[in-house]
Image (tube, rainbow, N blue to C red):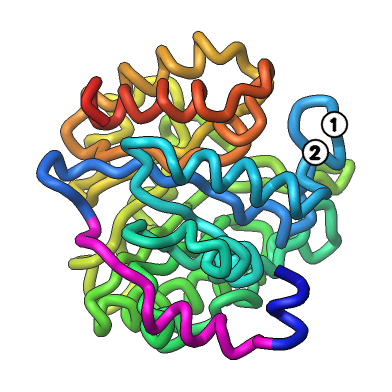
Amino acid sequence: MTEVRVRFPERVVEGWLGRRTRALVGDDGRLLIVAADHPARGALGVRGDRMAMGSRLELVARLVVALQRPGVDGVLATPDVLEDLLLLGALEGKVVIGSMNRGGLQGAAFELDDRFTAYRTADEIAARRLDGGKMLTRIDLADPGTVATLESSAAAVTGLAEHKLMAMVEPFWTTRGADGRVTNVLDPDSVIKSIQIASGLGATSAYTWLKLPVVDELERVMEATTLPTLLLGGDPTAAPEATYASWGKALELPSVRGLVVGRALLFPPDGDVAAAVDHAAALVHGSNG
């Protein structure tokens, strides 16, 4: 891939223009998306390994395995990761969601400044024939920068809708502790408030999907929206059996239309990416994947 990037960088543009695309959802109206946009925020850790995602070659290899499994609809990532996969031919016939705002680096004094530093505009996503854009939208009432994040997310939602592309909004009610660490507040009422704020972003919600955590009282939480929702993978330190059980129960709710999972599938405790992905696909799409 490095040799191609050195000698034939134009193949990236050609690859996007020539890529075989697909409808966003199939007959069952559900999606299983593999997420790989953590590295661009400097978040490389999985369980006890702080540098688990430090090797791009290993990460891409795991993504290729995941994308080859039946029932995996697509991938969510930043331009660099997506372009590696594109050059390998791994994105043919897949849903591709571009991660947009990665400026809030993990552990930084400016972590809650979630600026758009990857795909910055809806036009950039549309020009590459991607299927949508995802924005992290953290809401901290004590941080004046939150309003800029909300404004930028609203502009992205509107712009993506103008191109008839999915706007995947990932809201969190967030606080910064006395030690400076940023924490997402995941009690049901806080998640409901974040949903209501995220749902109101932009000039239209026609193409807006939510990306939400699995939390307590999820049935009550999901009554907060009629928007289609994808659930994020959750804490990769939890036992896989417990994680699968929580996903299965959540997927029974009518507005929950699938999963967006990264580390829990790409770095399972036993190292078997294919088996982890197959289990998730069965939960999302049924045994036929």
Are dots 2 and 1 in contact, CB under 8 Å? Answer: yes
Q: Which residues are magenta?
A: 8-24
Q: Nearer the viewer, residue 170 or 243?
A: 243
Q: Residue at x 50, y 11 (%)?
A: 242
Q: Position of residue 71 (x, y in %)?
A: 32, 37
Q: Residue at x 25, y 84 (%)?
A: 162
- Seen in the image, is 250 located left or right of residue 5? left
In the displayed structure, would residue 230 be above or below residue 251?
Answer: below
Q: Residue at x 54, y 40 (%)?
A: 65
Q: Position of residue 198 (x, y in %)?
A: 38, 58
Q: Is residue 146 visible?
A: no
Outermost residue on the left side: it is 27
Name which residue type carries label 2.
Ala
Quadrant of the drawing holding the N terminus: bottom right
Q: Is residue 22 magenta?
A: yes
Q: Is residue 110 visible?
A: yes
In the displayed structure, would residue 9 be above or below residue 263?
Answer: below
Q: Tell me the quarter of the picture where residue 230 sits.
A: top left
Quadrant of the drawing holding the C terminus: top left
Q: Residue at x 61, y 75 (%)?
A: 118
| Crowd band around label 2 with a 10 angstrom C-alpha radius: few (<14), some (14–19), many (20+) | some
Query: Which type of secondary structure does the marked residue at label 2 adopt?
Result: loop
- Seen in the image, is 239 located left or right of residue 52? left
Q: Which residue is mark 2?
A: 52
Q: Nearer the viewer, residue 128 or 65?
A: 65
Q: Position of residue 84 (x, y in %)?
A: 62, 65
Q: Position of residue 183 (x, y in %)?
A: 69, 41
Q: Which residue is mark 1?
A: 49
